[in-house]
Amino acid sequence: MSMPTIPAEPNRPNQKQVIIDLLESIALEEIALSHLLNAEAEKMQAFVGKCLDFPTHPTNSQILQFNREATRFVETVLMKEWLLLRKFENVTDLIQSRRRVCCKCRPSK
C-alpha cells in the first residue's frame, strides 16, 4: 500500500503562514482566557462586596460552594494554559526544525 497524497490546492498556505496562524490562534485563546478571568474576578467582587461585607449575606455553605466553583474554574484555566504552552512549544520546535532544514539548504560561501 502506498501513502496517500494530498492534492495541491491553489489556496493552501505555506509553512510560514501556518506558523503565523498557529501563533495567532494561541494569542486569541489567551485573550479569551483573560476575558473569562476578568468576568470571574467581577463575579467574585460582586459576591464578597467592595468592602468585603458580603452584600448578599450568604450562608457558610454558600461561601464554601462559591469557593469550590471558583477553584474549579481556576484549575480549568490552568489546564488550558498548560495546553497553550505545549502548543507554543510545538510551534517553536517547528520553527527551529524549519531553520535547521533551511540552513542545510543554503549554499556555503
Image: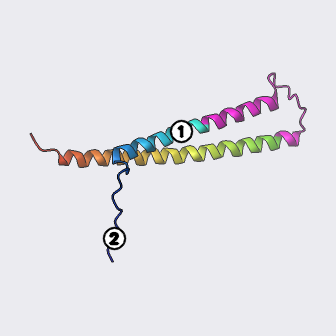
Indicate left or right for 26 with 18 as reference: right
The stretch drawn in magenta includes residue 102: no
Q: Residue at x 82, y 26 (%)?
A: 49
Q: Which residues are magenta?
A: 34-63
Q: Which residue is mark 2?
A: 3
* Residue 82, percent from left and from top: 54, 46
Residue closest to the far front: 10
Of the residues shown, which amino acid type is indicated by label 2? Met
Q: Quadrant of residue 55?
A: top right
Point out residue 79 in the picture as x, y percentages from the top left corner.
Answer: 59, 47
Residue with the mark numbered 1: 28
Could you tell me which secondary element the residue under label 2 belongs to?
A: loop
Q: Alpha-carbon neighbours of circle 2 within 10 Å: few (<14), some, or many (≥20)?
A: few
Which residue is found at the position 56% from the left and 43% from the top?
81
Q: Is residue 2 left or right of residue 88?
A: left
Image vertical order of residue 41 relative to residue 74, above or below: above
The answer to whether residue 31 is left or right of residue 49 is: left
- Residue 12 image point, x, y percent: 37, 51
Residue 41: image x %, image y %?
A: 71, 32
Q: Residue furthest left?
A: 109
Q: What amino acid type should be assigned to the residue bearing mark 1?
A: Leu
Which of the labelled discs sits on residue 87, or is there none? none
Seen from this angle, which residue lies furthest top? 51
Instruction: Give the residue at x 45% y 45%.
Output: 22
